[in-house]
Amino acid sequence: MRKLILQLHLWVGLTAGAILSVVGITGSVYVFQPELTALLYADLYQSSNQGAKIVDARSIVKTAEKQFDGKVSNIFFPLRELENYIVKIDGKKEFIFYDGATGLYLGEMAKRRGVMEDVLEIHRELTIGEMGSIVTGISSLLLVLVLLSSGLYLWLPYKKKQLKDGLRLKPNASFKRRNYDVHKVFGFYFIIPLFLVSITGVYFAFSEEVQAVVDYVTRTKEPTPDVTKIKSTYRADLPEVTIAQTLDMMDEMYPGYYKRNLIMPKDSADRIYFSVVNTAEVDAGPEYRPQVYIDQYTGKVLYAYEPHTSPAGRQLTRNWFVPIHFGEIGGWLTRILWFFTGLMPAILWVSGIIIWRGRKKKNKRNKVLHRNFSTQ
């Protein structure tokens, strides 16, 4: 049995490990995305007066629509190291930045987070779109179901006195022994963080399937709606809800929350979407983020995710999975831990390859010796 599990661990690790290494390293970088983006694009992300009161979004909308002679379709509000407004104008590809303290135009950028968007794309999709998302999702699932479980089984010592060797790096060891210890010891200590990162990562690739499993486990009877199918019913007799009216709704419905983003309809069948969040900073704990879908003609709420009153299964995935996946669940402590956790797949993959090659060479030598001995 042990030999079979070892072979399973080996070949799954050699194949999925390459994908997980890329996903892990980009994930490590993305843990500090808010701070890195603000640092890399300080002229666009950091306000001219960091202590000043944030100007009202309505004035930003008026300024942008007048400046570019078009309707504002998206607003990203000052939040999580972003101290300024970002807006999108219909027909314009670039993201437009306005100072959060003065409302003045700052500039434009092709991607909202610049190079960090590329990091996220590699992390999620390996730059190959939906197929890449499936590949990363399956690799994460293999890590959870095969690599971590088989690794733990192989780590377990035969005798209690061998337990100490599985918990520490042996001092003054040879390169071969040190590499083996790195694979074994680091794999053991990071098994729980790797499990949490991977299982939540599977959710981002296969959200409907994972949500169904979570709903079943938590005995959630009310099915989670497919938000991609939420549409407005066209009404020629009614005017469209304006962006100003939507901002009023955000203020009235969630006075104690911080506005996160607002997306206006793309066509006559689309709906208005907005979300708010419980904290403006990168904080510890669950993320309470109400998300609301509104009919663009009647202003009626078509669906609203409420983080405190929604079914248990939905609360688990939406309140907890994002901060767990990105390491924000425990604040700076878990963010730093998650940074090193992201490096582990690459470390375990490389050390595993070295172990495998060493055993191949050993087996080859043994075969040669056996053949020479047989011919004598």
Image (cartoon, rainbow, N blue to C red):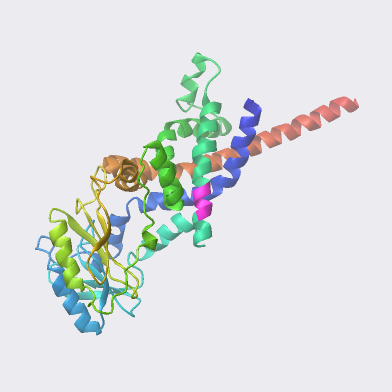
Place of residue 187 in the rendered image (x, y in percent of width and height, measured from the top left):
48, 34
Can see residue 245?
yes
Q: Looking at the rendering, which quadrant does residue 57 occupy?
A: bottom left
Out of 267 and 351, give the one closest to the viewer. 267
Residue 362 lies, with reference to residue 278, above or below; the image says: above
Which residue extends farthest front?
A: 237
User: Which residue is most to the right?
Assistant: 376
Residue 341 visible at all: no
Percent position (x, y) of residue 111?
Answer: 36, 69
- For this view, does 348 lie left or right of residue 220? right
Depth check: 137 or 173 in front? 137
Residue 225, compared with residue 183, is above or below; it is below
Left or right? Give the position of 314 relative to 258: right
Residue 252: x %, y % from top left: 13, 60
Please name the residue shown 49% across and 56% down the image. Answer: 133
Horizontally, residue 120 falls left or right of residue 42, namely right
Q: Determine the residue positioned at 41% across, 50% down.
A: 27
Q: Give the quadrant of the N terminus.
A: top right
> What main secondary structure does the magenta stretch of the protein show?
helix
Q: Which residues are magenta?
A: 134-138
Quadrant housing the C terminus: top right
